[in-house]
Structure formats: structure tokens, C-alpha cells
Amino acid sequence: MNVTIVDYKSGNISSVINSFREVAKEKVNIEVTSNPNKIKSSDKIVLPGQGSFKSCVEALNNIDGLSDTLNEFTLINKKPLLGICVGLQMFADIGYEETETKGLGWISGKVSKIDNQDGKFKLPHIGWNEITIVKDSKIFKDIENNSHMYFVHSYEFVPNDKKVISATTDYSTKVVCSVEKENIFGTQFHPEKSDKSGLKIINNFISL
Amino acid sequence: MLKNRIIPCLDVKNGRVVKGINFVDLKDAGDPVEQAKIYSDGGADEICFLDITASNENRDTIYDVVKKTSKKCFVPLTVGGGVRSVEDINKLLNCGADKVSINTSAVENSKVVIDSSKKFGSQCIVVAIDAKKNGDKWEVFTHGGRNNSGIDALEYAEQMEKNGAGELLVTSMDRDGTQVGYDIDLMSKISSKVNIPVIASGGVGNLDHLVDGIKLGKASAVLAASIFHYGKHSVKEAKDYLDSKGIPVRI
């Protein structure tokens, strides 16, 4: 099996690569590429993302044929994809970081700034927070409710259809921190930095 | 609920830990990778390396340390010390650091923070502020505490937030190494001034100091070096203690 981590120059993805290689050992081949042909032939895709919504979308669109390939992989071939952090946020129709930017539109909704209640909550939301699992998700197999995950973000994904939400976390409001819609998975937190629980989520995704 | 973080810090010189945990079962007490792994297995919320390598020809040793550590520790890794440019930050991130802390160069050239937070995102840019009390204010020092910039630490903290820092690592130079506790006044003033998380550093001698840093100093995270060295306290003991004092921690 081939799992491809999409390297579209969205910032630092070393930790994502390291954690997937740690979990995959020799059983699964982990590729790191932005080459559309290699992505087409892989079994699963990981879409990381750091920096702003706008810079990630721009970086993705800068690579010829990449967004078409991702659309085909996810929407037509319906193969599993995991978006992490801004990787998840890009599932939305639209994001409001820096300026209004169109997203991939795979899960309808928007990405807006977390309401910090006039400074009562510091942003970015950085650190370990508990997740509340609100529906069974394949990537949460053997993950206990209220497990701690590592977060770093100031913006949140607000999907229109609440049924896609698989977990939330409390920070000012109930922030959506995991989604599952058919073959599309996403986490706002960083499983690659969330110690044993995070590695288990990665293993669950690889084992799908 | 968001938890307060405990961050053990290791001083690394020429690729070796200067002061470290002195456990009998350690194969190599000077190996930063092994020490970092002990911390992360023990429940550290993040690991911090401070590179204190003095000579330029040995500066590359930290890259190797970061590369090896990031393959074994799956909690966030912050690396600081001698970071001069956007290119230095890029190299550390590519080696597997999750955050880079910038000290002297943030004072000397504001573009380093502005450009790097734009390029890599604020989440990985930590500005380290070394502050020393002078009368009723604090001044920012650079070059490992040798040079006084004369800049007011509170105004500087606010400016760094504007420039794109994701967190501030605030060290009281008056307290560093004294083990008498954080400069609570400094921590709480800076924390109230900015809307980004503050990591308190400098002066921890016992577990109550960690409690004070969070409760009184309003820090989001507490960094400590020496209390975790030589096995005086484990990270787990520290967390259990904070928990017993009603501070939310990840256990």
C-alpha cells in the first residue's frame, strides 16, 4: 500500500513525515510528493497545512494539476484522504484568514476566526486540549473520549452540515476538531504531535 | 479545556547536553536525543532545546540533534539559540523542529520575525525575551544576556505580537539560575499586555514555583531546566503536583 503525503510547500511537514514513517514501519510505503501522477496512483492521501488558509490554497494552486488531481482522488475515486490543521480547513467553501479565499469545497462551510471573547481567550489556541467525540469515526478506533490532542490554530472550520462533525474541543466555543464525510477525514489538531493517541489515529487512518 | 503546559528545557552545546537528567539507566547522559525521549515518555507537553554552542564551526551539530530527536519524540519540539535568519529557521524546521525561538535577531532585525511568521506561520515562531529589571521597568537583553538593548520589555512584547510571534518565551534574567522562583510581576504584566500565550522561564527551584507561574504569573506554559535535571523532580511529579493545586494539566 502507498500513502502519499502531499508536499505542496505549505510549510513545515517534517513532523508529519516522521510520524507516518514511525507508524508505517515497513508495512506501508510513505511517499512525499506533489507530483499529480504519483498522487493518482496512491491508495491514501495526507493533506497537511501550516500557515494561513490563503497561503495554503495559493501554494496548492501553484502546482499544475494538483487541485484537479486531489478532486478526482477524493470526489470521483472516493479514496481516503486525511487533512490536518489547515489541510482540514481547506475542505471548506471559503476561508476568511487574511482575505476571503475560496477553498476546495469538499465539505460545505466556512473557516473563520475563533471568537476570543474580547481577549478572554488567547489566540492562537496552542497546547493540549481534550476532544469530545460526538460520532463514531473510523480514525477514532480505540481512542478514548476526552483524549488530549495538540492544537495550534486561530481559525476554525464551521461546516454547514453538523453531521460531518466527529469531535469538538472546548475553547471559547465548541470548536470543530475532527470531521468525517464518507472517505474524507480531517483533524484540526496535530496527530503527528499528539504523542501516543495521535500515533494511534495515524495508525487507524493507515489501516483503513 | 485547554491545559497548561510543562516544558522541560535542555541546554545543548556542541551536540551534547550540558546539564541533564542523571538517571542510572541512562546509556549516555550527554545524549540530547535520549534525554528528550525520557521527557516525552514521562509526559512532557513539549521539549525545548537551547543551543548554547559558542563557536560557529560547531553550529551544525544542533541540526543533527533535531533530526534524530524528531524521529523519536512525537510531542512539539522547540529549538532556540543562535537563530539569526529566516534561512536558519527554515533549516531547523526542515530538520523536524516544530517551533523556533528567536532572541537576539528579533531585537536587531524586526524583519526576521515579520518575514518568518509570514513564510512559516505564526504557530512556529516563538520570540524569546530576556528581561532584566531596571527601576520600575524591565529592559530587553540580547546576546545571551550580555548586552542591554535598553528596550522596554512590555512594549517590546506587544510589538513582537504585532510582528507575528505566535508565543513569547519570557525569561527573567534576575531570576535565571537562582532557583527562587519566576519573576511573577514580569510574567503577569506581559501576559496581560498581549493576547498570545506566554511561556514563563527563569528561576524555578521547586514545584510551587511552577504553580505560581501559572496562577499568579498568568503564564500558559512553564519552562524549567534544573528542577528536572539530576532527577530532582520528574515531569510526572510536577504534573501531579499542579493537578493537586487545581491547575489543568494533561495527565
Image (cartoon, coloured by chain):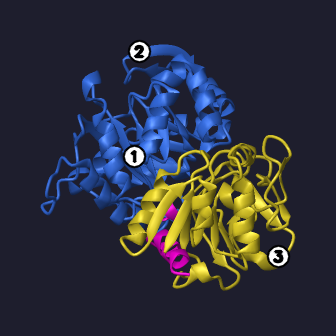
Q: Is residue A75 above or below residue B122?
A: below
| Amino acid, disc 3 | Lys
Q: Colour of chain B?
A: blue
Give the residue displayed 49% in from the left and 14% down from the top: B149
The label shown at residue B147 is 2
Q: Quadrant of residue B88?
A: top left
Asked whether, in this view, residue A174 is left or right of residue B47, the answer is right
Q: Is residue B6 magenta?
A: no
Q: Which residue is mark 1?
A: B48
Q: CA distance from mark 2 to mark 1?
A: 24 Å
Asked whether, in this view, residue A168 is left or right of residue B93, the answer is right
Give the residue displayed 39% in from the left and 46% down from the top: B48
Tell me which segment is drawn in magenta. A191-208
Q: Chain of mark 1?
A: B
Q: Is residue A62 above or below residue B22?
A: above
| Amino acid, disc 2 | Asn
Q: Chain of mark 2?
A: B
Point out residue B155 in the picture as x, y percentages from the top left corner: 64, 24
Q: Is residue A193 magenta?
A: yes
Q: Is residue A80 above or below residue B215?
A: below
Which chain's colour is yellow? A
